[in-house]
Image (tube, helix red, strand yellow):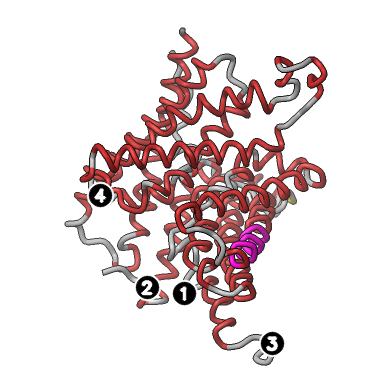
Amino acid sequence: MESILNIFVKSIFVDNMIFAYFLGMCSYLAVSKNVKTSLGLGTAVTFVLFITVPVNYLLQNYVLKEGALQWLSPQLASLDLSYLSFILFIAVIAAITQIVEMAVEKFSPSLYSSLGIFLPLIAVNCSIMGASLFMQQRAFHNIGEATSYALGSGVGWLLAIVGLAAIREKMEYSNVPKPLRGLGITFITVGLMGIAFMCFSGLKI
Amino acid sequence: MSTLLSKKSRQVLLGPLSKNNPITIQVLGICSALAVTAKLEPALVMGISVTIIVAFSNIIVSLVRNTIPNRIRIIVQLVVVAALVTIVSEILKAFAYDVSVQLSVYVGLIITNCILMGRLEAFAMSNSPWESFLDGLGNGFGYAIILIIVSFFRELFGSGTLLGYNIIPQSFFNVGYMNNGLMMMPPMALILVACIIWVHRAKNKELQEK
């Protein structure tokens, strides 16, 4: 239980998807113009992460890992299918994103129209695929740890995008040097936020 | 050059190097661009890998573009890209194991690199294979250039080396010069890219926003 909580807190603050690994930057920069939309996208990303990482964890441990197919028959113990992991992970992610898109379209048309093109693009949001690959790399002990990692990463991403959106809303009124307007100053802001987040490093529960 | 490539092809190939750069103008593929730039060597490998994958996935998708049903095109594109990335990742593991360890998950993340999906959607779905190939090459190079500039400064000031060779002479350190540890931290990559954007847009006024 302790390790689950530890992983959760660490993945929000220390291993933050945006500030430590730059995952999901494209939609992070493009959608963070106002707080409401970014809150919607952050929630969608968290939700998709929360579903895809445990599914991919099961896939990794019962199908792909070396000797993982042993439960099927003892002859398969030496089989190592991990070279298939990219294709299978992305297929799972694309399928789940499709389902989430349909659900959002049905239950919240206003959120659907404000997220626009970025909802189907969650499938190619690096943070989703990245979380699955980190899950594979870190070899979590059980599905609880993997789930808490996914949830923590999602919440960290949500926190980062809402924070940036709030800053950008205020920045509309400030006088930025012309060549830096738009993209440039956003990069610098994210960099400074990243430096601020560095003070969490070493945090442990 | 002019006989080999028509004017449009040249525009397609060279545009992404500066005026239409995938990172600083189109804002595509920033995730991996920043993460692998702490050293020059992984950045070079990453730039080459992405260029190859963009060029070939552009060709393949452009060849099959008329047979893909519109509704499932994203999944088809993802599968094409994922297959190419798997090949590149296995080749890296076989011939450049150290670099592939340094790149860790970011090789796999080329699949979800926005440059790929962005170029496939915006260009390969509506253009001939040859032009798509040039577009892929151009965007790959545009991406690689930014990676190389950023990693050059980060490695030079962060650890005093380039490609692993010492550049800053020992006498500098004796006088009290110190490597800037902040350069190795992730946030500095963002700030360096911002500086590149700043210089780039100060020179090309038509690119400035608002």
Relative to A88, A1 lies left or right? left
Say which element carries label 1: loop
Please say if B132 is above or below B60: below
Residue on which disc 4 sits: A114
**Principal secondary structure, stretch drawn in magenta:** helix
Please state which of the two labelled residues, at mark 4 or mark 2, is closer to the viewer. Answer: 4
Dots 4 and 1 on the same chain: no
For residue B207, the mark is 2
Say which element carries label 4: helix
Mark-to-mark CA distance, 1 and 3:
22 Å
Say which element carries label 3: loop
Residue on which disc 3 sits: B4
Q: For residue B86, which quarter of the picture?
A: top right
Question: Who comes first in sequence, dot 1 or dot 3?
Answer: 3
Q: Which residues are magenta?
A: B51-62
Mark-to-mark CA distance, 4 and 3:
46 Å
Badge 1 amino acid: Lys
Mark-to-mark CA distance, 2 and 1:
8 Å
Closest to the observer, A62 or A160 = A62
Chain ID for label 4? A
